[in-house]
Image (tube, grey):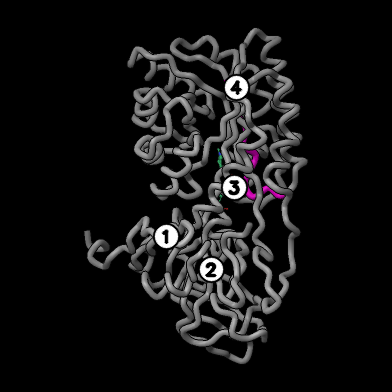
Amino acid sequence: MQFIHYRDKELYCEDVPLADLAEEFGTPLYVYTKGQILENLRAIQAPLQEPDHIVCYALKANSNPAILQLLAAEGAGADVVSAGELYLALESGFPPDKIVFAGVGKREDEIEYGLQNDIFSFNAESVQELQLISLVAMRLGKKARVALRVNPDIDAQSHPYITTGLKENKFGISAHEALEAFRYAATLPSLEVSGVHTHIGSQITRIEPFLDAAKFLADLVSRLREAGIAIQHIDVGGGFGVQYVNAITHEGLPLELGDSAPPPLSQFIEQVLPTLQATGCSIWFEPGRSIVANAGVLLTRVLYTKENGVKKFVIVDGGMNDLLRPALYHAYHQIVPVKIETYEHEKVDVVGPICETGDFFARDRLLSKTKRNDLLAVLTTGAYGFVNASNYNARPKPAEILVNGEKVRVVRERQTLEQLFS
Ligand code: LLP
């Protein structure tokens, strides 16, 4: 079921007309659907029925506390990358033994915070980090469970900024140094080296790179075992792609050109599982985007339209400070009218109010004809949306709303001007 959908010509989030939310709470406004988040989580959990297969939600995609509490209550674990995310995860009720701490640059106080809370594992990314984790653990009289992130040099065929598993990327320990690093880690006191970890990138829309990563991991586990290193868990990372183009279709909307839909989530998991399960290890996944992206929209209102003979601009009240992805990655987000009033389309640039040419949501985009005060929905913005919002140009951050059926909850208030001064 599509939780964000048209009823006739009006866009709804579950049973709530989005126009009502914009009216009541103002724009720009992030709106999330609880139903879609739960459906996404369950699609990943379903093929992972074994008790030792864990889905750790990557908080970086969307760390709104209400969403975190929802996912924790549904049995998800958490993938965190900072003391802040660990704090949010603990406060939201994720059990510490289902929390993994990733990230290429953990500070000493962050390692200590993780150890004090007995998290499941650190995903270490360098030999120096292993040494520091061991030292801190020794000081605290604890044993730190560690997985080593190995960079398999696999091309995830995603955007260069979010491809992480290539030799030239900063992440992990390179494949040819892995065995030596594991051997060394096994000699360090206060460490229990029990896992292998990879994360090859984000928004990956083909299954093959995951299959390659799974084969790489299974092979690594058997080589490590031959070397006498007992590996008990494999963390495959996240990265499952979602559909950005034609996320919603309607006879009144232009059909968008571009990538076809990625395979359903369950297929990604089902196809890599046999290779991983054959190792006898527990299997951990760290999805972020695939759980929340299609559960969110950014509502924005048209302030002005103007033409300069070359282009037509639709100037909206949301900007790159609210949603950075288009400016940063040239990311594509479908933009649709909240009320379809015409079936006529026109090519426009949808731009924000910020004083930067890079402040755009879409360029040369075929869109339903719009006029001043129209409401637009920027789709598939539940992941890496609000979390990247900033106060650039001293613009307060938008509010966030969570919808459940007919119920509407403000899960983060809009920032006020006064907060900008504090
Ligand atoms: N695990 C690790 C170690 C990661 O670095 C990431 C994402 C994930 C899991 C979750 O990946 P996901 O399932 O969400 O693809 N800001 C970018 C995405 C950056 C992803 C960074 N790492 C964007 O807006 O596309």
User: Closer to the camera: disc 4 or disc 1?
Assistant: 1
Separation (CA) of disc 4 from disc 1: 40 Å
According to the image, label 2 marks what residue? 12
Q: CA distance from mark 3 to mark 4?
A: 24 Å
Q: Secondary structure at mark 1?
A: strand
Q: Which residues lie in the magenta part?
A: 195-205
In this figure, which residue is indicated by the disc labeled 4?
A: 233
Asked if the residues shown at circle 4 and circle 1 are in contact, with their CB atoms under 8 angstroms apart, the answer is no
Quadrant containing ligand 1? top right
Q: Residues within 10 Å of mark 4 (few under 14, many from 20)?
A: many
Give the mark, 3 or 2, whose residue is nearer the N terminus.
Answer: 2
Task: Using the numbered discs, state the Cα–Cα distance from disc 3 to disc 2 in whole angstroms.
Answer: 19 Å
- Amino acid residing under circle 4: His
Q: Residue at the location (61% across, 22% down)?
A: 282
In the visual, does 405 lie left or right of 276?
left
Q: Quadrant of the C terminus?
A: bottom left
Residue 335, image quadrant: bottom right
Give the labeled residue for mark 1. Answer: 407
Q: Is residue 24 magenta?
A: no
At horizontal 75% and vertical 47% (from top left) the residue drawn is 206
Mark 4: secondary structure: strand
- Mark 3 surroundings: few (<14), some (14-19) or many (≥20) residues within 10 A: many
Cα distance between the residues tagged 1 and 3: 20 Å
- Above or below 199: residue 334: below
- Residue 103: horizontal and vertical position, in percent? 49, 36
Tell which circle, 3 or 4, labels the residue nearer the N-terminal end.
3
Q: Amino acid at mark 1?
A: Lys
Q: Which residue is mark 3?
A: 40
